[in-house]
Image: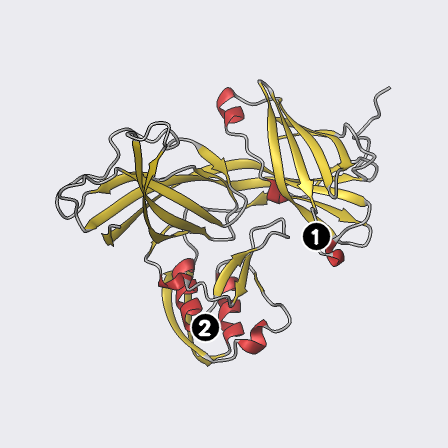
Amino acid sequence: MRPLLFLALLTAPVAFAQPKDAGDVSKASMVTLKLENAPPQKVFEEIAKQGKTEFSVSPAKTFWSTTTAPLSVAIDNQPFWLAMKDACAKADVSLKYATDTAEPRVILARDKQNWTQLPSVSSGPFLVSLRGLQRSSTVDMHKPADVQRSLVAKVTVFCEPRVRLLRGSMVAKVEQATDDKGNSLVRKTPDADAETMNFVTSWVYNLDAPLEYPPKDGAGAKLPVLKCSAKFVAQVKSEVIEIADPVASKGASKSVAGRKITLKELRRGEGEWEAVMTLSWDQLTAEQWAGAVFPGQSMKLSDAEGRSVVARGFGVGGKGDELSFIFKFEKDPPKASRIGRPVKLTWEVPTETRELPVTFEFKDVPLP
């Protein structure tokens, strides 16, 4: 006989936390801050507070003691990322993304990335930085006369860490790119990946913007305007599923926002835990089912000592009305971060999403 899973909250293997609402994810968090000769830690803590987030630091024990030069900032109602760019430039601080938390988290570091020197454009909760342009030619000796040439603009998209991104464009769409000699570098044939979206598990995301290769004769030296667009899907509302004793809770399931979620098993693989989950079409429309997304970074395992690890990778399979996911945890972690037998699996499940278009424009871009 199949076990009864939902007799009571205290005995059920699947439980829910309170629903979460991210509010309006389409707008930037605005920062106002005026400090004279202030400790850097105070500056960044205030920016984090106004941006509804928290920062980590690396190395944790010495970061603030080696970032001691006082800062003076005068930020008047500026988007979060412009405030960050100002403070990081003055403090010589770089940014890294955290891989050990279930929520998007910015790590402040000092590794000389000089990210603040890149041309950047603010758009809603995003900051888009142009890293460069890359031109290449390839000759395949099976067909030596068929030379393949490409030109690509490379950008990095920063999203406020208070917003959880779920999907992003595979490539950016070039809207305008005419060089200073009148040559249009907008591709004549649309890129096949222009409308395709990929999973996103962090607040930072790299994108390519494919351009038409310039003509051999009469090519320009720069692009007076390079205008591109992309789109992302962000989580607006969510619920957190908690499965007690996941190793012994094979088959535990629950319906969430019209989707039936089942833990097939939690098993010990080669050097890591693996959670096998299925997502079934329960009460969704075809359009809602097509947009169902579940990032791996939102799932974590916890042991009896309170230690936890997050899923650092996942695979997706299946077809029709059921998808299968295999989430992987703690492959070759530091000894101190390894967990014992998991006593709880936690998964933040998106219940409402919103598409966020972003348009960005750079001027006087040199061509390689």
| Residue 59, quarter of the rendered image | bottom right
- Is residue 343 placed above or below 60 in the rendered structure? above
Q: Residue at x 21, y 40 (%)?
A: 214
Q: Position of residue 66 (x, y in %)?
A: 55, 77
- Is residue 58 placed above or below 9 in the rendered structure? below
Per the image, label 2 sits on a secondary structure element best described as helix
Q: Position of residue 55 (x, y in %)?
A: 56, 62
Q: Residue at x 58, y 20 (%)?
A: 319
* Foreground: disc 1 or disc 2: 1
Check disc 2: other Cα within 10 Å, few if <14, some if 14-19, many if 20+. Answer: some
- Is residue 42 placed above or below 29 in the rendered structure? below
Pick whichever, 137 or 276, lies toward us: 137
Point out the residue furthest to the right here.
Answer: 1
Pick whichever, 352 or 73, lies toward us: 73
Check disc 1: other Cα within 10 Å, few if <14, some if 14-19, many if 20+. Answer: few
Q: Residue at x 24, y 50 (%)?
A: 367
Residue 19 visible in rendering: no
> Residue 50: which disc?
none
How far apart in space, not on screen, are marks 1 and 2 (Cα)?
A: 31 Å
Query: Does the residue at mark 1 contact the one at mark 2 (Cβ under 8 Å)?
Result: no
Three-letter amino acid code at the position of disc 1: Pro
Q: Position of residue 287 (x, y in %)?
A: 48, 23
Q: Is residue 166 left or right of residue 150?
A: right
Three-letter amino acid code at the position of disc 2: Ala
Q: Is residue 333 left or right of residue 285?
A: right
Residue 360 visible in rendering: yes
Q: Position of residue 328 (x, y in %)?
A: 67, 40
Quick one: quadrant of the N terminus? top right
List the residue tagged with mark 2.
91
List the residue tagged with mark 1.
333
